Amino acid sequence: MKLRKHRWSRAYESAEEELELFLEKHNIQADRWTAEPGEAIPGEASKQDKRLWCAEGTVIYAVNGQDISLQPGDTLDIPAQMYHEAQTGLGGCICYQHSTDAKA
């Protein structure tokens, strides 16, 4: 997996219900998590590849010295062992996360 931001939705403002349907359609088991407005999400370097979907609000991930902003409809792929931390926007965020074993 490579570090990559892309869209899961063609709509500019997507709803959480649309993301749930997308995940179900693609048979993806993802964990839902929320963060409060302005919350700092502690940094980590996961042992697994991680894919994040933003369902509501905004969150900015700091990865490899670059800031990557996510809003509803965005997806972020983070490779295993890549250190990342995040900060939510003024409205907090609702995200879904799926982790998989890194490919050798």
Image: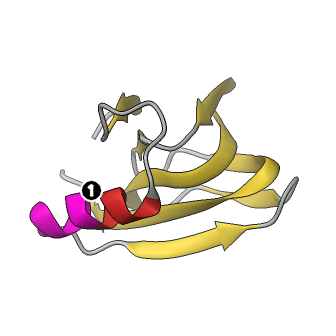
Q: Position of residue 93 (x, y in %)?
A: 66, 57
Q: Is residue 65 visible?
A: yes
**Segment colored magenta:** 21-27
Is 96 displayed left or right of 83 in the figure? Answer: left
Q: Position of residue 69 (x, y in %)?
A: 63, 32
With respect to residue 57, does 70 lie above or below?
Answer: above
Is 47 displayed left or right of 84 in the figure? Answer: left
- For label 1, count other residues whose C-alpha is less than 10 Å away and answer few (under 14), some (14-19) or many (20+): some
- Quarter of the view holding residue 98: bottom left
Looking at the image, which residue is at 76% across and 61% down? 42
Magenta stretch prevailing secondary structure: helix
Q: Is residue 64 visible?
A: no
Q: What SS does tag 1 mark?
A: loop
Q: Nearer the viewer, residue 82 or 56?
A: 56
Looking at the image, which residue is at 43% across and 45% down? 14
Residue 26 part of the magenta segment: yes
Q: Quadrant of the N terminus?
A: top left
Looking at the image, which residue is at 76% across and 57% down? 92
Task: Residue under label 1, please give it.
Answer: 102
Residue 13 part of the magenta segment: no
Is 35 displayed left or right of 3 in the figure? Answer: right
Is 25 displayed left or right of 7 in the figure? Answer: left
| Residue type of the residue flagged with mark 1 | Ala
Q: Position of residue 79 (x, y in %)?
A: 39, 45
